[in-house]
Image (tube, rainbow, N blue to C red):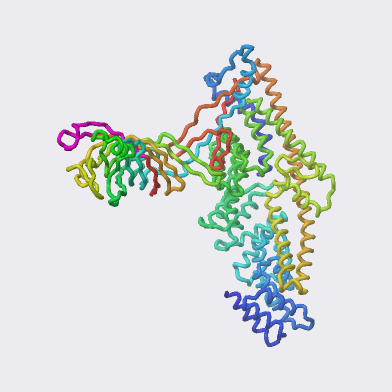
Amino acid sequence: MKKLLLFVTLATLGTAARAADEEEKDTAGEDASAEETPADEPDASSAPAAAEAEAATATEETIFVVQGKPFLVAGKFELSPQIAQSVNDSFTSHTGLTASGIYHLKENVAFELTGGLFGWWDVGGPRLGGRDSELTVELREKESLAPERVKLYQFPWFLGGDAQWSPLYGKVSVHDLALGQFNLYLSVGAAAFGLQLESLTQGGAQKAYVTGFGPYDFRTTLATSFGGGLRFYFTDWLGVRFEVRDYVLPLSVREGDVEDADGPSFDVTNLVLGQAGVSFIF
Amino acid sequence: MKRTILFAATLALALPASAQNIEKAVKAFKGGDYDVAAAQFYSVLRFEGEEEGDIAEAQYGLAKSFEKLGLPLAALKYYEDIAKSGNDHPHFDDAIEGLLAVGDALDDDLKTPQILDSVYTPENENALRKMNPEVLQRVHYTLGRFMFNRANFKEARDFLGTVKPGNPKYPHAQYMLGLVRLGVGRGDNYAPKYDQVIEHFEKAREAIPKDASDERLLELRDLASLGLARTYYEQAYQLDEGDPKRNDGLARARSEFLNVPRFSGTWPQALFERAWTETVSNNYGKALGALHSLRAPYFEDEFYPEAKILQAIIYYYNCQWDRVNAILEETKDSYGPMTKTLQALLDENFALDEWYPLLQKSLKQQPGDKSSNLLPRPVAFAVTKDPKFAKMEGFLREIDREAKVFEKNDTFKRSDMGREMTDFANDTRDAYLSLVGKYLKTKVNDLNGELGDITTRASIVALETKTAEADWLELGKEIGGQSRARQPRPFIPDDTFQFWWFRNEYWVDELGYYEFTIKTECFE
């Protein structure tokens, strides 16, 4: 083989002119300069810079990699438990757990169903729902003020569905020893949220709720969701997810719903959740 | 276990006529106390007046004990004694089998085949033919390889052809038969039997289980793929351009080169040779991409000087004269001084045993070091990648390891056996060092010739380029000065593929996948 290769070196040189002719035929009819950057006539002041730029472009090679993805997900399912924390807390705060089931229709398109529970551990023990933020507590205790009732809604649970699209992908390398693939995805969907509203007067260890707005009254509201996240795959079955999702909820407290309210109130609330979890692909 | 029982039974038969030593030796052997057994068997051999039968048992017992102790070189010495004493020896068959086993453990292409060749005489032929067919076929494989290395191709073919499917050496024999049919190593006008070559290489590859984990088998599978690729390439290259069979052959060659697993030992060679296949197929972007991979830091210790020439040829085809000239200058600057250094070292007329220490010193150089008293670093590393040298070095290491065992083992170090075996290891080392030195000198000489040849070819390409540039000037075409913009993003088959630009940073996972977009600058 070596002899042959050596022979090829010399033999191919002999055919160089013919090869060039063929190339000429291939490019006939094309404007050879169309895809090239013509060298502009430089003025005296910009000459050194132009010369440098020319040197840079003259040596530019077009080098790329097209390689099969190491982990394919099209047609696969993904289960993803996550922890979630509201990040735009003003008057209420939510902490919880979510579980998502995802079907990857294509490599970059997926559908997701998610269910989540929010809860907190108060003096009375664990319970469903959110909690008043520090600001709300401070307003109430130091200023004897309270926000509009509509801003104090808490959400014990939610169920949602969304479509995901991954427009970008990337990879990370740790000293050439570990390689992780990730993709950035955007999602849009809808959800149903459970509602609860605490009484302004709390008398004991157990939380008191406005009549008809307790955690087991199953008051609900619909929401739309927008989000985005990063999904890292370390193997073909395991990954991690980081996500931010904005649930937009139209909320209202109508006349008569709440006895101690000043009046009806309406709001469009953005519940922004930061989520992190693991993904199991199968 | 079965072998141990048979061995013990054989020794038991000899007991009535034996001295006490052999009884003790057998007892120690049966108890798994192999160093004590070895010492006892050795004392039987040293005891004058010992019965012939006991001596024979002691020879085999000693060889077997050494084998059990993981001292294949020491075992080889005593198996050799038995085998060379002829088929009258009660353990002749066992010794042949033992030789094969320790030869395999040592990956020995030199000593074991020589011993077997000296034993494969008309006097022993009948005894050998009555042996277990599996063992006999392994003997034939070893001898076939030995004959091939001695350019005795007909005998090599005859020996290798007797190794049947199911034998552990069958894939190896088929691979060697492929080389024989291809005419590797022949200086005459042998016409390769391509169909048979392909059949042998494919049989070699198919005979290796898919889930094989033995490194030597995996390497053989890669070598078979490389052999197939080279055969398809060689066949296709002889056909005229435009012949569909040529295109088909080149496509098969490319596919076989890609069959060589990434990061395997033969991968860099496959990458380099695929670059040639892509060039001949006019896939210049892929050819440059394969060469680009070889320039990655991962391949720092690989040495493919011819890659520069190929790169220059590709740019020559595309009339990118400035790039051709730059590469040729770089080639001359890199390899010219290397050739001078190598020639000066060859002129020094070092003693043969000085070459190996010289190589070891040369390997300690840092990248970029240029000492005129040492082999250039890339050349030194290229030598260590040579499979034949790697085997020789492995053998040398084994000699040193076993010498240390005999020096340090409590049972051996104060005994005559320990001293004799240490002396044996040292003598073997001295003899072997000269052999290694001879091979190294030849190898360095070959590499020097190769580098000289590269420089010559660089000059030829430079001359052709000057002629082409002169033609351009005559036609009023400007040379150089044009800027080159990055070409558009290439076609990506579907979303199961990823695309990355190369941004002057090599990623290990991308090696082997690089491609260039090269736009011809030739004109009508």
Task: Return the x and y of residue B336 as percentages of the image width and height.
Answer: 76, 36
In the image, is A179 to the left or to the right of A272?
Answer: right
Task: Tell me if residue A72 comes above or below residue A255 in the rendering.
Answer: below
Q: List x then y, in percent, for residue B420.
A: 78, 70
Q: Is residue B282 visible?
A: no
Is residue B487 a member of the stretch shown in magenta?
Answer: no
Residue B147 picture location, percent across and down: 70, 58
**Residue at the image point whose x is 28% and y is 41% from the top:** A160
At a point 69% along the width and 60% down the height, the residue shown is B108
Instruction: Tell which of B332 and B318 is nearer to you.
Output: B332
Return the residue found at the far top: A43
Q: Residue at x 67, y 85 (%)?
A: B15
Front residue of A97 and B467: A97
Q: Is residue B212 left or right of residue A249?
A: right
Name the residue nearer the viewer: A210 or B316: A210
Q: Is residue B156 visible?
A: yes
* Image-quadrant location for residue B483: top right
From this view, report whether residue A61 is shown above or below residue B173: above
Please give the name of the residue rendered at 62% of the width and 28% of the height, measured from the top-left corner. Answer: B317
Q: Is residue A271 magenta?
A: yes
Q: Which residues are magenta?
A: A250-273
> Percent position (x, y) of residue B310?
65, 35
In the image, A90: left or right of B404?
left
Quarter that holds the C terminus of chain B: top right
**Would residue B206 appear left or right of B419 to someone viewing this image?**
left
In the foreground, A274 or B4 = A274
